Protein backbone atom coordinates (compact mmCIF):
# COMPACT_ATOMS: atom_id res chain seq x y z
CA UNK A 1 0.00 0.00 0.00
CA UNK A 2 1.73 3.23 -1.13
CA UNK A 3 1.91 6.28 1.16
CA UNK A 4 2.15 9.96 0.28
CA UNK A 5 5.10 12.22 1.03
CA UNK A 6 3.05 14.08 3.66
CA UNK A 7 2.22 10.85 5.49
CA UNK A 8 5.90 9.83 5.35
CA UNK A 9 6.98 13.23 6.72
CA UNK A 10 4.40 13.03 9.54
CA UNK A 11 5.51 9.53 10.53
CA UNK A 12 9.16 10.54 10.43
CA UNK A 13 8.45 13.58 12.65
CA UNK A 14 6.57 11.37 15.12
CA UNK A 15 9.46 8.88 15.32
CA UNK A 16 12.02 11.69 15.75
CA UNK A 17 9.93 13.15 18.59
CA UNK A 18 9.98 9.78 20.35
CA UNK A 19 13.72 9.28 19.80
CA UNK A 20 14.69 12.78 20.96
CA UNK A 21 12.70 12.49 24.19
CA UNK A 22 15.02 11.88 27.18
CA UNK A 23 14.98 8.52 28.94
CA UNK A 24 12.56 8.63 31.86
CA UNK A 25 14.94 7.26 34.51
CA UNK A 26 17.76 9.57 33.44
CA UNK A 27 15.40 12.54 33.50
CA UNK A 28 14.20 11.60 37.00
CA UNK A 29 17.77 11.28 38.27
CA UNK A 30 18.69 14.69 36.89
CA UNK A 31 15.63 16.24 38.50
CA UNK A 32 16.48 14.64 41.88
CA UNK A 33 19.99 16.03 41.61
CA UNK A 34 18.65 19.48 40.74
CA UNK A 35 16.15 19.35 43.61
CA UNK A 36 18.88 18.46 46.12
CA UNK A 37 21.10 21.26 44.84
CA UNK A 38 18.25 23.78 45.19
CA UNK A 39 17.64 22.55 48.73
CA UNK A 40 21.31 23.02 49.64
CA UNK A 41 21.35 26.47 48.02
CA UNK A 42 18.32 27.58 50.06
CA UNK A 43 20.03 26.47 53.28
CA UNK A 44 23.16 28.33 52.27
CA UNK A 45 21.12 31.42 51.43
CA UNK A 46 19.68 31.46 54.97
CA UNK A 47 23.17 31.11 56.47
CA UNK A 48 24.46 33.88 54.21
CA UNK A 49 21.65 36.17 55.37
CA UNK A 50 22.58 35.46 59.00
CA UNK A 51 26.20 36.33 58.27
CA UNK A 52 25.17 39.59 56.58
CA UNK A 53 23.05 40.54 59.59
CA UNK A 54 26.01 40.22 61.97
CA UNK A 55 27.39 43.43 63.47
CA UNK A 56 31.00 44.15 64.27
CA UNK A 57 32.40 42.25 61.28
CA UNK A 58 33.76 44.08 58.23
CA UNK A 59 32.11 43.60 54.83
CA UNK A 60 35.15 42.02 53.18
CA UNK A 61 35.37 39.10 55.60
CA UNK A 62 31.59 38.59 55.37
CA UNK A 63 31.79 38.33 51.59
CA UNK A 64 34.74 35.94 51.73
CA UNK A 65 32.88 33.67 54.14
CA UNK A 66 29.75 33.69 51.97
CA UNK A 67 31.76 32.94 48.81
CA UNK A 68 33.46 30.06 50.63
CA UNK A 69 30.07 28.60 51.64
CA UNK A 70 28.63 28.82 48.13
CA UNK A 71 31.79 27.32 46.63
CA UNK A 72 31.49 24.38 49.02
CA UNK A 73 27.83 23.81 48.08
CA UNK A 74 28.42 23.97 44.32
CA UNK A 75 31.46 21.69 44.37
CA UNK A 76 30.70 18.16 43.23
CA UNK A 77 32.83 15.39 44.63
CA UNK A 78 33.60 12.42 42.43
CA UNK A 79 34.21 9.07 44.08
CA UNK A 80 37.57 7.44 43.48
CA UNK A 81 37.68 4.05 41.88
CA UNK A 82 38.16 1.22 44.32
CA UNK A 83 40.48 -1.61 43.28
CA UNK A 84 39.82 -5.10 44.63
CA UNK A 85 42.93 -7.24 44.45
CA UNK A 86 42.23 -10.90 43.79
CA UNK A 87 44.57 -13.85 43.49
CA UNK A 88 43.20 -14.71 40.10
CA UNK A 89 40.43 -13.60 37.83
CA UNK A 90 38.58 -16.84 38.51
CA UNK A 91 37.63 -15.33 41.88
CA UNK A 92 35.51 -12.82 40.01
CA UNK A 93 33.43 -15.58 38.47
CA UNK A 94 32.95 -17.53 41.70
CA UNK A 95 30.58 -15.01 43.29
CA UNK A 96 33.00 -12.76 45.17
CA UNK A 97 32.60 -9.01 45.04
CA UNK A 98 31.39 -7.75 41.70
CA UNK A 99 32.98 -4.96 39.73
CA UNK A 100 30.70 -2.02 39.16
CA UNK A 101 30.93 1.66 38.42
CA UNK A 102 33.18 2.50 41.37
CA UNK A 103 35.00 -0.82 41.76
CA UNK A 104 37.39 -2.71 39.56
CA UNK A 105 38.80 -6.17 40.13
CA UNK A 106 42.52 -6.47 39.46
CA UNK A 107 45.15 -9.08 40.16
CA UNK A 108 48.24 -8.36 42.23
CA UNK A 109 50.54 -8.40 39.20
CA UNK A 110 48.63 -5.55 37.54
CA UNK A 111 48.74 -3.54 40.76
CA UNK A 112 52.51 -4.06 41.09
CA UNK A 113 53.07 -3.05 37.46
CA UNK A 114 51.12 0.14 38.03
CA UNK A 115 53.18 1.02 41.09
CA UNK A 116 56.39 0.31 39.18
CA UNK A 117 55.33 2.61 36.34
CA UNK A 118 54.70 5.43 38.82
CA UNK A 119 58.06 4.82 40.48
CA UNK A 120 59.89 4.79 37.13
CA UNK A 121 58.21 8.00 36.03
CA UNK A 122 59.32 9.66 39.25
CA UNK A 123 62.89 8.40 38.78
CA UNK A 124 62.95 9.68 35.17
CA UNK A 125 61.97 13.17 36.33
CA UNK A 126 64.71 13.28 38.96
CA UNK A 127 67.33 11.84 36.62
CA UNK A 128 66.59 14.56 34.06
CA UNK A 129 67.16 17.20 36.73
CA UNK A 130 70.43 15.54 37.72
CA UNK A 131 71.62 15.36 34.10
CA UNK A 132 70.87 19.07 33.59
CA UNK A 133 72.74 20.08 36.73
CA UNK A 134 75.74 17.88 35.85
CA UNK A 135 75.89 19.41 32.37
CA UNK A 136 76.03 22.88 33.83
CA UNK A 137 78.88 21.85 36.19
CA UNK A 138 80.87 20.41 33.27
CA UNK A 139 80.33 23.54 31.25
CA UNK A 140 81.70 25.65 34.09
CA UNK A 141 84.85 23.50 34.29
CA UNK A 142 85.54 23.83 30.58
CA UNK A 143 85.63 27.61 30.77
Image (cartoon, rainbow, N blue to C red):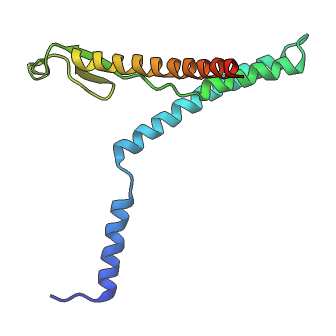
- Indicate the quadrant where residue 135 lies: top right
Image vertical order of residue 71 relative to residue 26, above or below: above
Give percent across and percent down for residue 46.
Answer: 71, 22
Viewport quadrant of the N terminus: bottom left
Left or right position of 92 against 109: left
Image vertical order of residue 3 relative to residue 43, above or below: below
Say how many tags the image has.
0
Give percent across and percent down for residue 74.
Answer: 60, 29
Image vertical order of residue 70 relative to residue 27, above or below: above
Viewport quadrant of the C terminus: top right
Left or right position of 59 against 48: right
What residue is at 34 percent from the left and 80 percent from the top?
9
Residue at the farthest top position: 56
What residue is at 41 percent from the left and 44 percent from the top?
27
What residue is at 26 percent from the left and 16 percent from the top?
84
Give percent across and percent down for residue 35.
Answer: 52, 34
Amino acid sequence: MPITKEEYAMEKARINAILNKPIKKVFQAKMRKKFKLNKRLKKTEKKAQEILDQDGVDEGSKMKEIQKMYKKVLRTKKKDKKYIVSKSFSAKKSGGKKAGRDTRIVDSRLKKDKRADKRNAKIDKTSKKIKKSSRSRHAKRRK
